[in-house]
Amino acid sequence: MGKVAGSVSIIGGADGPTSIFIAGKSGKTKLTTRMRNYFHRIKRNRIKKRLTANSHTLEEVVEWLKQEYKAVEISQQSFSYQEQRKCLKATLVMRHCPDLLGERVDLKPPEREDMEALKAFWEQLQEQEKRAAEIADDIFPLDFHIYEIRGPKNCKMQIGVETVWQVLDASYSGDKRSMKQLKKLSEEIYLYYGVAAEDIKNQTERYQSLLAILSS
């Protein structure tokens, strides 16, 4: 059975996952897409009514993961850790301190399916990532850790936690049979992180992010 992967993320406990949709040549939205969006809105509204205040700190999340799921921190010298840290740092620098990158370039994905434009966009992303990685940690600090939960048949989940900028990120991979269980586990993790009453009242970005995760 083939191996597939999925990931969801909360940036700063506030910023929901971003999806890039490339329209076809006609620029029209397919009927199936409109129907899917309609049912997604229904699901989202149902979840809104059920969400209650029950928030925890990232430190509490880590302790819960260790106790409930025997999560183990992976080595900070590993290739996986180094690559994820590099990507996260670039994302956070561009979000919070873009001036550290020098001349700011607002990156926008191409609106249509154009391989040359996509290639140029990717190269710009890579360049910004490289420049962000060169910023010293005393100028832009990170406290990043990755915890791993292992399952049967090479299934696994990695949970990234960054305490300076308050980042929680879960990614998972495994065979098709395991993916539903892993998705439910990721939702459980984000629910445990949760939202406060103030988040619900003000519909903060943390609240909107949790809503996006649960309705995906």
Image: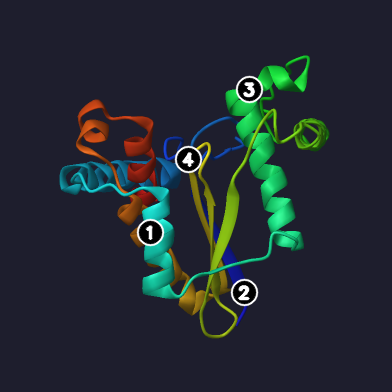
| Residue at x-position 62% and y-position 77% | 2
**x%, y% of residue 214?**
34, 51
Mark with earlier residue (2, 4): 2
Mark with earlier residue (2, 1): 2
What kind of residue is marked 2? Lys
Label 2 – label 4 distance at C-alpha: 31 Å
Q: Which residue is mark 4?
A: 166
Mark with earlier residue (4, 1): 4
Q: Quadrant of the N terminus?
A: bottom right
Q: Secondary structure at mark 2?
A: strand
Mark with earlier residue (3, 2): 2
Image-based side of 61 in relation to 85, left or right: left
Along the line of sight, the residue nearer the viewer: 21 or 197? 197
Q: Which residue is mark 3?
A: 97
Q: Secondary structure at mark 1?
A: helix
Mark with earlier residue (1, 3): 3
Label 2 – label 1 distance at C-alpha: 23 Å
Whether residue 154 is situated above or below residue 89 in the rendered picture: below
What kind of residue is marked 4? Gln
Mark with earlier residue (3, 4): 3
User: Residue 3, which numbered label?
Assistant: 2
What kind of residue is marked 1? Ile
Q: Name which quarter of the figure residue 90 lies in.
A: top right
